[in-house]
Amino acid sequence: FKTQVNFMLMNSFNTSKDTLSFLSKYPALVEDPKIELMQNKVPKIDKKTMLPAEWSINPHLEWCPPGHGDLYTALYGSGKLDALLADGIKYMFVSNSDNLGATLDTDLLAYFASANMPFMMECCTRTEADKKGGHLALRVADQQLILRESAQCAKADEPMFQDISRHKFFNTNNLWVRLDLLKQLMDSKGGFVPLPTILNGKTVDPQQDTSTPVLQLETAMGAAIECFAGAGAVNVPRSRFAPVKKCSDLLLLRSDAYEVNAASVLVLSAKCGGVAPIVDLDDKKYKM
């Protein structure tokens, strides 16, 4: 297509050093001044006192990145959004780095551009393995597409939340965004996207279940779908979603349920009939 594609990784204070160290084997990438977008950081909140958490053993653990919804604020506040627009970049494709099925699909780009949408979310059909994750919904009041995350769901509503016959689609976090319209939205809102805040319960030291219980204040980048009038979603094949967040995910992807195709993309084997096997390991024993 004779077009220069910009590649950017959003890092936090926890991941920047390791990421750049790994990329040192690829000089063309690591020497690109545009390669890294640095997230902001916020204090973890002590659940008991509702004050910033303290952990003298390792003060570094008192802080956390505010979720991937910080993407928009980081782009805007760093000046990188303006720089991309100045370079003539109009469309942005975003995905989780651990999603091995996420590729820059030009057919999807063409569809997004021709549909003239400000924002588009790639969704997959939910299965039993996905029922605890966030799902796409339509807000009755104004018929606006929204994203509901499990952390936003009341305990009493969990059975309905996990009903895959009622809520049929989940967010892959593969997102397409019109940068000029993102800039327009953020200018009108004082430099941020008004995303719902998620209270994520953790421990101050994620490796110690007995350490101080805390709340991490986070936002989800997919939740921006409710901030754009005319935003849309597209149902994509399961091959677009192959995340590695837990040991069970890694075990599944290393099994013969997945294979690498001719385009060097990890895909679900045809013998699975489009449905990935379920692997369930004890998260307390198997940590990544």
Image (cartoon, rainbow, N blue to C red):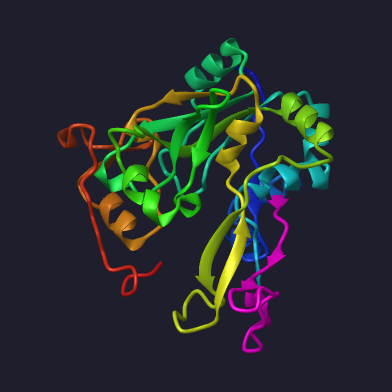
In the rendered image, residue 39 lying in the magenta stretch gets the answer: yes
User: In the image, is residue 204 above or below residue 69?
Assistant: below
Q: Observer-nearest residue: 181 or 272?
A: 181
x then y, percent, for residue 90: 71, 23
x then y, percent, for residue 84: 77, 32
Instruction: Please identify the residue farthest to the left as the structure is shown.
Output: 271
Residue at horizontal 81 percent and vertical 41 percent from the top: 191
Circle count: 0
User: In the image, is residue 43 above or below residue 25?
Assistant: below
Residue 128 visible somewhere in the drawing: yes
Q: Main secondary structure of the magenta part?
A: loop
x then y, percent, for residue 145: 53, 28
Q: Is residue 20 left or right of residue 127?
A: right
Q: Quadrant of the N terminus?
A: top right
Instruction: Please identify the residue farthest to the bottom as the structure is shown.
Output: 57
Residue at horizontal 30 percent and vertical 40 percent from the top: 163
x then y, percent, for residue 123: 42, 31
Q: Is residue 43 left or right of residue 235?
A: right
Q: Quadrant of residue 260?
A: top left
> What span is in magenta?
37-62
Residue at horizontal 28 percent and vertical 47 percent from the top: 129
Q: Quadrant of residue 47?
A: bottom right
Residue at horizontal 41 percent and vertical 67 percent from the top: 288
Q: Observer-nearest residue: 78 or 186?
A: 186
Q: Observer-nearest residue: 78 or 269?
A: 78
Residue 89 visible somewhere in the drawing: no
User: In the image, is residue 15 above or below residue 231?
Assistant: below
In the rendered image, residue 11 lying in the magenta stretch gets the answer: no
